[in-house]
Image (cartoon, grey):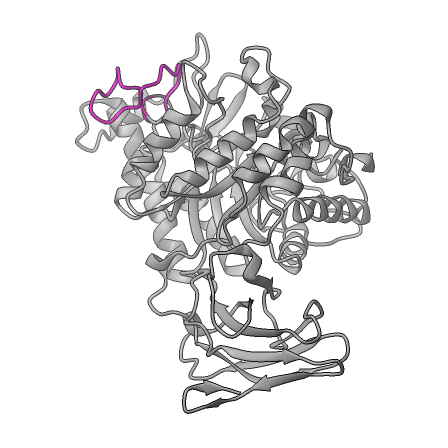
Amino acid sequence: MFQLFRIHRTSALLFALFLTTTLTAQRNLPVAELRGAWLATVVNIDWPSVPGLSSERQQMEFDSILDVLKAMGMNAVFVQIRPAGDAFYPSAVVPWSKYLTGRQGLAPEPFYDPLAYMIKSAHSRRMEFHAWMNPYRATFDLDTASLAPTHPLRALPDNRKGEWFFRYGNRYYFNPASALVRQHLLSVVRDIVVRYDVDGIHFDDYFYPYKEPNQVLQDYNDFAADPRGFSKIEDWRRDNVDRMIRDVSEMIKGIKPYVRFGISPFGVWRNADQDPINGSQTRAGITCYDDLYADVVKWMKNGWIDYVAPQLYWSIGFPPADFEILLDWWSKHTYGKHLYIGHAAYKVNNNAVDPNWNKPDEINRQVSLTRANAQAQGSIYFSVKPLLRNPLGVQDSMIRTLYPNQSRVPGMLSLSNVPPATPQICRVGGSRSAVKLAWHACDIGSQEENPYYFAIYRFDGQGVGDFQNERNLLAFTPFYTEKWIFEDPSAAVGEVYTYVVIAYNRFNVESYSSDPVVVKKTKNKAKRKKKFWGFLF
């Protein structure tokens, strides 16, 4: 079972053929780039491997996954904590997930809080934790008898269930038209934001359900009873979802402004034949706006979400939906919000329709295009398990080529009114093996000014160089660093270096850089070179 979580060290033959070319193309690697993975829990896609494992085994599996993701260069994980009206954390109103324990409503044994554990595990590896939630899916099948007594589909009286839920296909869904449902979902999200140290709340592409043959949404009576001035039911449905997104956004920012709210929508908003002015040059059979009733563009325009991560799960050159065309389209419709690109890791060497996924460099080429687009700030992969299986050497490629350097999540300047306090290096010391630095930060007047972690830069010689060159970045400190010190064991005897420290707050916004400190490494210690009339000696 645990062999899936082993770091693969043997490259595929095809991977080796293009490694040299890709290394050349990726020489200047970004030091600010979101690198994430979706960890799906529904039907145990990624974790836990099977339901009902002991608490210790669940924790071991999760830690093993994070260790591999960290080795692959990831700095964020998006974990599905609400797959179908249930929870991967203790709640008074939401039952425990059956994908965790094997039976909905049953707590893990021995008891622990999986969400608290996962957040701590991610943060200890300097990885952000985004709580991925499916807001409207109430069940994954029609077996209501196995639902926990606290699930609203069982707990509510029969005359209220018709207002809260509708059946579509082989599942039940929370009704987006219900104000009571909206308040329930708002309470669920509020509980997480208040009780847990999450970095983000993340909704996926499931709003109104994907259309199925011979199925009709049973909401015409709701529309007739309260159309709210809309003449078309499609616009009314979009407004139902709009209200939920707006309320969640306002609630989050009112409690913890640094918690980011993001959406990973279906990759095509509208086709050009549906909207000649704003649509993309695609021929997708489903669109976000027309079929899922999710107007993500409006949410960005109105500032209701902080980032968008469209699921561009098609290859470069795929005629109905070309990755490159969609990347360009989304980059022109972000309205100042962060754009992270969703990549289909699950299709690598696993797609009979599109032969491009049999090419070992497809993901590399997609990342190269993403990095070349000034509006894109990173990538997220679906899902974890394919990355761990290493098809066509995709894991090797990430370790050696795409993400061999350290990187932080890009800052959101729009959310931070002030930068964190500027650090200043106050002590320089050394030993036979390392240069030692210590710093402080004064005049911290607000939470935004409080440093959350630091970056230590080292430049060869006397003088400050390029902060965007990954070779000059020595390290990031852990989150919630208590001791503001750093040891540089790579300093060479007889060499002169210039050190600079930069602070980052919970928005990943950087401070002004510290005053540079010039240090010469001697055989037994490190000597700080002092300034006198503008000269160093």
Instruction: In this rendered view, identify the residue nearer to me: 13 or 255.
Output: 13
Q: Residue at x 53, y 49 (%)?
A: 130
> Viewed as shown, does residue 113 lie left or right of 368?
right
The answer to whether 458 is drawn above or below residue 186 in the figure is below
Compared across the picture, whether 354 is left or right of 89 comes to: left
Location of residue 333 in the rendering, given as x and y in whole percent from the top left corner: 29, 37
Residue 488 in view = yes
In the rendered structure, which segment of residues is drawn in magenta? 270-290
Q: Measuring from the top left, give residue 461's x and y in whole percent.
A: 55, 72
Q: Residue at x 68, y 23 (%)?
A: 14
Residue at the farthest bottom position: 532
Residue 510 in picture, x, y percent from top left: 44, 65
Give above or below for 282 relative to 366. Answer: above
Determine the main secondary structure of the stretch shown in magenta.
loop
Q: Residue 150 versus residue 357: which sits nearer the camera?
A: 357
User: Which residue is at the far top?
Assistant: 214
| Relative vertical location of residue 382 with respect to residue 408 in this rendering, above or below | above
On the rendered image, what quadrant is the N terminus found in? top right
Relative to 32, is 517 above or below? below
Residue 137 in view, yes or no: no
Query: Which quadrant of the figure has residue 174?
Result: top left
Q: Nearer the viewer, residue 97 or 310?
A: 310
Asked if residue 459 is among those painted magenta in the image, a careful observer would answer: no
In which quarter of the view is residue 123 placed? bottom right
Q: Any magenta on residue 285?
A: yes
Nearer to the camera, 399 or 163: 399
Quadrant of the rendered image containing residue 241: top left
Rendered location of residue 3, percent (x, y): 82, 35
